[in-house]
Image (cartoon, rainbow, N blue to C red):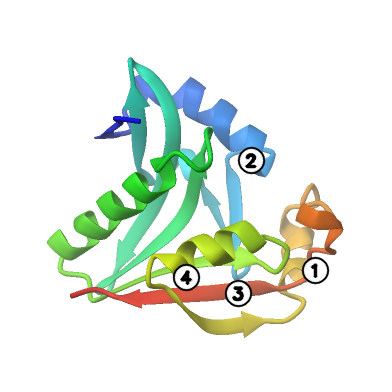
Amino acid sequence: MPVHIEKISEKDKKEVLAILQSFWGDSKIVVQIEIFDALSLDGIKAVDNNKILGICHYRISDKECEILTLASLNPGQGIGSALLNEVEDIALNAGCHLISVTTTNDNLNALGFYQNHGYQLAALYPKQVVISRQLKPEIPEIGYHGIPIRDELRLEKVLK
């Protein structure tokens, strides 16, 4: 599927919010007890025929890029890979040496996806989601595959 990757613009906010709501309940993202409003972050979108097929939000700080959202509306069609490749290019062009992402223990698809793209497990934060629920109570107790959501896992990739 040929997709174009573009920066998320102000006119995209309503559609991006709908995507964020469908994946994370709202635009609020909690990672390591930090709360982010994804709509205020830098972001890119995968587009085909003026339709958004995927989004990615990130932040760059101290030569590191952290992916905070990555969502494909049509899994298995290369949309997530296209977004990931683009955010890695953005990070390299910004002088970053490392890119990271944090996901939850139940998200087996994400764990496989990132590892297939050269990311390695770097840290386990046991029971971190229990703490995050104090900041965002709408985080569900049970996640993908019926797995209780408890822990966060950080994956990293050294950029060359």
The numbered disc on residue 153 is 3
Side of 14 where 32 appears, left or right: right
Q: Are marks 3 and 2 in contact (CB under 8 Å)?
A: no
Write down the residue under mark 2: 23
| C-alpha gap between disc 3 and disc 1 | 14 Å
Q: Amino acid at mark 3?
A: Leu
| C-alpha gap between disc 1 and disc 4 | 25 Å
The residue under the point 30% across, 62% down is 60
Q: Please tell me whether mark 1 sits on a helix, a strand or a loop.
A: helix
Q: Amino acid at mark 1?
A: Val
Q: Depth-wise, is mark 1 or mark 4 nearer the camera?
A: 4
Q: Please tell me whether mark 4 sits on a helix, a strand or a loop.
A: helix
Side of 56 where 20 appears, left or right: right
| C-alpha gap between disc 3 and disc 2 | 18 Å
Q: Quadrant of residue 125?
A: bottom right
The residue under the point 65% across, 33% down is 22
Q: Give the mark nearer the N terminus: 4 vs 3.
A: 4
Q: Give the mark nearer the N terminus: 1 vs 4.
A: 4
Q: Depth-wise, is mark 4 or mark 3 nearer the camera?
A: 4
Q: Amino acid at mark 4?
A: Gln
Write down the residue under mark 4: 115
The residue under the point 49% across, 22% down is 15
Q: Give the mark nearer the N terminus: 3 vs 1.
A: 1
Write down the residue under mark 1: 130
